């Protein structure tokens, strides 16, 4: 198996993201473990990677399908030196960074669905779960949890994921080195994290716009049983989606599932 602790350690050596590395053949959730390590004082750049998760978590309390030997499940500890209110761009940043890494494999076909689902064509290949611990309006740490379908075959997805999910292997037609993709993703995260640190959302807004293709589109956002509709005007400095409603008023959306609608 090309995906083991030693190979990962060699591939991540010297990178700003990836040291120290904690590798687990099986774990409940890398996010859960990273949160615990961060609480105990683990430094920025610490990474937890697992070959398999027994309780992988997704956004909105969903499960994240995490079988062994095929995918990437990773959580990164960041300790940004900016106030809690400015930490949301990190969620957008992570999506942009993963999309940039996947461009290498599927040029021109990678898209972002707000806030940070990464799609190839119209199917989801990666999801990101951000968890933040704050104290006194400052960020203590941020956990960026990344799930990426790399070599899983379409027939092996859980039936409920149906046609909505894909993997790099399915899109390219041949298996991909999980160690290589992991290195690329961590490089891109290191690079885009610096951009956000230096220029906030301005550092990544255009990239987000290019990958998302949502600006100017009519969308429907579902959150907690409520549906909002409007035309996407962009994202603001906190990473919230701005939509213009039919009435002409603008609305900030901070969470939800976005679907494009016709008309
Ligand atoms: C989503 O719902 O799209 C976000 C999915 C995030 C899954 C990753 S896998 C690694 C990390 N550990 C978890 O338990 N969740 C995240």
Image (tube, rainbow, N blue to C red):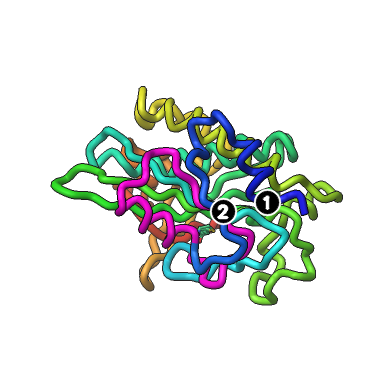
Check disc 1 and report its element: helix, strand or loop: loop
- Work out whether 138 lies above or below 262: above
Write the residue at 68% across / 51% down.
4
Write the residue at 34% across / 38% down.
236
- Work out whether 212 lies above or below 133: above
- Work out whether 158 lies above or below 242: below
Residue named by callout 2 = 23
Give the percent coordinates (x, y) of residue 161: 65, 70
Query: What span is colored magenta in the figure?
Result: 30-57
Give yes or no for residue 164 being in the magenta stretch: no
Write the residue at 50% across / 28% down.
191
Relative depth, front residue between 186 and 227? 186
Give the percent coordinates (x, y) of residue 156: 76, 70
Give the percent coordinates (x, y) of residue 94: 48, 42
CB of residue at label 2: within 8 Å of ligand 1?
no
Drawn side of residue 179 relative to residue 250, left or right: right
- Report the quarter where the N terminus lies: bottom right
Q: Specify the farthest residue to the bottom.
A: 159
Separation of marks 1 and 2 at Cα, in angstroms: 8 Å
Give the percent coordinates (x, y) of residue 232: 44, 45
Relative depth, front residue between 67 and 114? 67
Residue 179 visible in the picture: yes
Contact? badges 1 and 2 (CB < 8 Å): yes
Residue 216 visible in the picture: no
Write the residue at 77% across / 65% down.
154
Give the mark nearest the N terminus, 1 or 2. 1
Residue named by callout 1 = 4
Name the image quarter holding residue 239: top left
Drawn side of residue 85 relative to residue 164, left or right: left
């Amino acid at each position: 198996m090309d995906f083991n602790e030693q190979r990962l350690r060699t591939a991540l050596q010297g990178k700003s993201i990836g040291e120290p590395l904690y590798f687990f053949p099986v774990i409940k959730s890398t996010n859960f473990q990273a949160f615990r390590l961060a609480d105990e004082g683990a430094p920025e750049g610490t990474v937890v990677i697992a070959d398999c998760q027994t309780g992988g978590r997704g956004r909105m309390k969903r499960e994240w399908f995490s079988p062994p030997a095929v995918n990437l499940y990773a959580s990164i500890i960041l300790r940004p030196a900016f106030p809690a209110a400015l930490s949301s761009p990190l969620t957008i940043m992570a999506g942009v960074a993963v999309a940039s890494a996947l461009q290498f494999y599927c040029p021109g076909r990678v898209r972002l669905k707000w806030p940070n689902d990464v799609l190839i064509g119209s199917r989801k290949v990666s999801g990101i779960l951000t968890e933040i611990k704050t104290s006194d309006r400052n960020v203590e740490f941020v956990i960026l949890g990344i799930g990426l379908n790399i070599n899983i075959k379409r027939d092996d997805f859980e039936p409920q994921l149906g046609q909505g999910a894909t993997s790099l292997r399915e899109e390219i037609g041949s298996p991909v080195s999980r160690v290589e993709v992991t290195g690329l993703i961590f490089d891109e995260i290191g690079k885009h994290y610096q951009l956000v640190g230096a220029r906030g959302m301005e550092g990544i807004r255009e990239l987000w716009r290019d990958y998302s293709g949502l600006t100017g589109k009519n969308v429907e956002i579902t959150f907690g049983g409520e549906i909002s509709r409007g035309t996407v005007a962009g994202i603001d400095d906190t990473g919230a989606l701005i939509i213009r409603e039919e009435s002409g008023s603008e609305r900030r959306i901070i969470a939800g599932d976005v679907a494009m609608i016709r008309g």
